[in-house]
Image: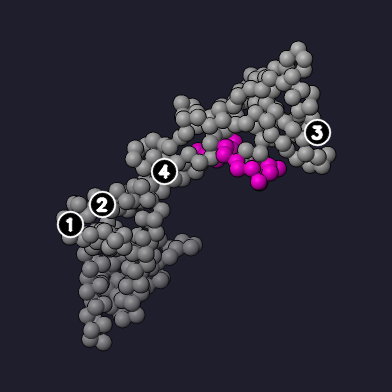
Amino acid sequence: MKAELYNKYSKELVRKIPRGSTVMYKLADIKPDPDNEGRFLIPAYQNVPSTDEIYDPNTDEYLPIAYITNVKADGEAILGEINFTRAGAGCLILNGNNPIHQKMYQYLELSNYNHSNENRATTVTAFFKKADVKADAKIEREERKMILLAMQKADELSVDDVKFVASSLGMRLNKSEEELRNDVEEYAEYNAEDFLNITLQQTNRTESLVREAVDLRIISHNQKSAKFVWRESKKDIFTYKKKIGVKPFYEIAEYLQTENQEELEAIESRVLAKRDNP
């Protein structure tokens, strides 16, 4: 096909990479390899068709576009190849100082195979997208923080809490404490969000226990002094910082679970005794 018949879009659709800048595209369906930790499932080769048909909203027309790298003497278009490869980690990095990259960028930005193209034809299966490096970095950091928090919480679990989490996950409990801890910590590392939700359930359970202990007049909550104390002995159990948005019962529940399991067991024992002998 003659080169002059392609890329007759309006000037509003012209795209340029700023000089000195780079743009990265990546395959949209890259997933972790379940059989190889730290690796990803990436196709050996994924070709982007060199021609496409797009809608130009400025002229209300459909027109052919192409990634043209050269033109023959007779005006015939020479099409270039655009490939995502496993060797390139499923990514393409284009440099604004490279004229060939500028042509590729123009084509990829308008391509219907580009998830990031807001004007793409949804009848076409898109398989790559422009990478927002800053946004991706932020997401990765947040995910890493979540994993670190999950691992920390897993390490701080009491024996009973380990059994609670293991039971919630349907794990067999007829194992040693070390084996159970290892199983729970491994789950926390690879399923951080789910693990934290389970520990939140445990915190909610402990919070309910403390509220019941207050209702049964086993312990007292003094809001003025920001303390929880044993009602009979007046011994302090927990003191929290008075500040806007503080949740006293959540705070003591977290404290009891992570730092004072003996006190938690004492509260639970007293509550159970009161339930049996109201």
Circle 4 sits in a helix, a strand or a loop, which is it?
Answer: helix
Residue, disc 4: 144
- Relative placement, left or right, of 179 versus 22 is left
- Relative placement, left or right, of 177 versus 185 is left
Q: In the image, what residue type sits under mark 2?
A: Asp
Give the Cα separation between the discs numbered 2 and 4. 20 Å
Q: In the image, what residue type sits under mark 4?
A: Arg
Q: Earlier in the sequence, mark 2 or mark 1?
A: 1
Q: Quadrant of residue 111?
A: top right
Q: x, y (%) of residue 273?
A: 22, 80
Q: x, y (%) of residue 29?
A: 50, 41
What is the span of residues highlighted in magenta in the rendered image?
117-137
Circle 1 sits in a helix, a strand or a loop, which is it?
Answer: loop
The answer to the question of whether label 3 and label 4 lie on touching residues, with beta carbons closer than 8 A, is: no
Mark 2 or 4, which is nearer the eye? Answer: 2
Where residue 175 is drawn, which disc sits there?
Answer: 1
Q: In the image, what residue type sits under mark 3?
A: Ser
